Image (cartoon, rainbow, N blue to C red):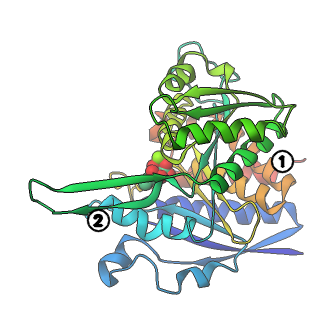
Amino acid sequence: MRTYRIAAIPGDGIGQEVIAAGIKVLETCARRDGGFAVRVDHFDWGSERYKKTGAFMPENGLDLIKGHDAILFGSAGAPDVPDHITLWGLRLAICQPFDQYANVRPTRILPGITSPLRNVSGPELDWVIVRENSEGEYAGVGGRVHRGLPEEVATDVSIFTRTGVERIMRFAFALARSRPRKLLTVVTKSNAQRHAMVMWDEIAAEVAAGYPDVRWDKMLVDAMTMRMTLRPETLDTIVASNLHADILSDLAAALAGSLGIAPTANLNPERKFPSMFEPIHGSAFDIAGKGIANPIGTFWSAVMMLEHLGEKAAAGRLMRAIERVTADKSLHTPDLGGTARTDAVTAAVCDALLGDNQ
Ligand code: IPM
Ligand code: MG
């Protein structure tokens, strides 16, 4: 029997509720499959720990999870902790040292979910956004001097390296090749940013030469927002820098019906380090503890985790179970306009998994 060791980091707010639900579903997947087991270790890293001890995770935190097969992350952020402290204290403190440079964000309109786009019923919108996840605008390079004085200066410097751009382009072209349409759009801003973004475009063209079967085009990020909204059917796989993809993936999630559904994988494709899977939504303190958080974003992230672990059959089963449940409007949580509770959605997904005969 294959046993996967999963490090669970629920974090803050609704992260606690959706990760508990996600683990139930993963355990049910394993039971239904019969070929593998999951062993989950829990880590209480997050804002509460920061407020008590001054650190989101212990000093040897990375050592504690580097031997795991995957990480399931909930969400980090509390109303009384500045967001940049949280991001750098936990999520980036894992993503960067574990070199999870490929952030993958699939977006589809699941059955039963309505897009805010008038002419989109479902199949027109089926995208995967590949976000460069290790450098660019999130490199953390910069500084601030003369605080509070009139001559105060602050910089955030984007860093683009040939290695970093080349590997994300290769990843994106390979992913595009694996999808039926073999279509990639490279997002850029090389009209205004004349150094790094021009190199980004040049490297895209170089890498493209190795993937002659992939059709690709280039799109300025501002024009991309219009194309996503007005001609969603012309897009398939999308690659963008860290910040561009951050922004576009929120737009994508909204166009697909809800941020509560959107999943993501922070991958170290070489598997030198564990990869991390998480719903895109935040800690949502306004609804935390009420039992109404949408667990679908976490379940879909668990599908991505199972795919990464090589459990294709189980991943397929879980995705079918999710789609069966979203198709039933009585199982929609309030973010989707329904009244269902997290527990009911979780139980329904588990039932659908156990009832799946493929
Ligand atoms: C995301 C989020 C994060 C980001 C926030 C929480 C810092 O928006 O994963 O898209 O900007 O990377
Ligand atoms: Mg974001």
Which residue matches tag 2? 81
Instruction: Tell me if residue 130 comes above or below residue 91 in the rendering.
Output: above
Horizontal side of residue 20 vs 70, given as left or right: left
Q: Residue at x 65, y 78 (%)?
A: 66
- Marks 1 and 2 sit apart, C-alpha to C-alpha, by 44 Å
Residue 190, numbered label: none
Outermost residue toward the bottom in this view: 60
Amino acid on which disc 2 is placed: Val
Looking at the rendered structure, the secondary structure element under dot 2 is loop
Could you tell me residue 73's position as x and y percent?
A: 56, 64
Amino acid on which disc 1 is placed: Asp
The quarter holding residue 12 reads bottom left
Nearer the N terminus, badge 1 or badge 2?
A: 2
Residue 356, numbered label: 1
| Residue placed most toward the observer, 112 or 313 | 313
Outermost residue toward the front in this view: 195
| Residue placed most toward the observer, 348 or 225 | 225
Horizontal side of residue 47 vs 216, given as left or right: left
State whether label 1 is within 8 Å of ligand 1.
Answer: no
The quarter holding residue 308 reads bottom right
Instruction: Tell me if residue 229 comes above or below residue 78 in the rendering.
Output: above
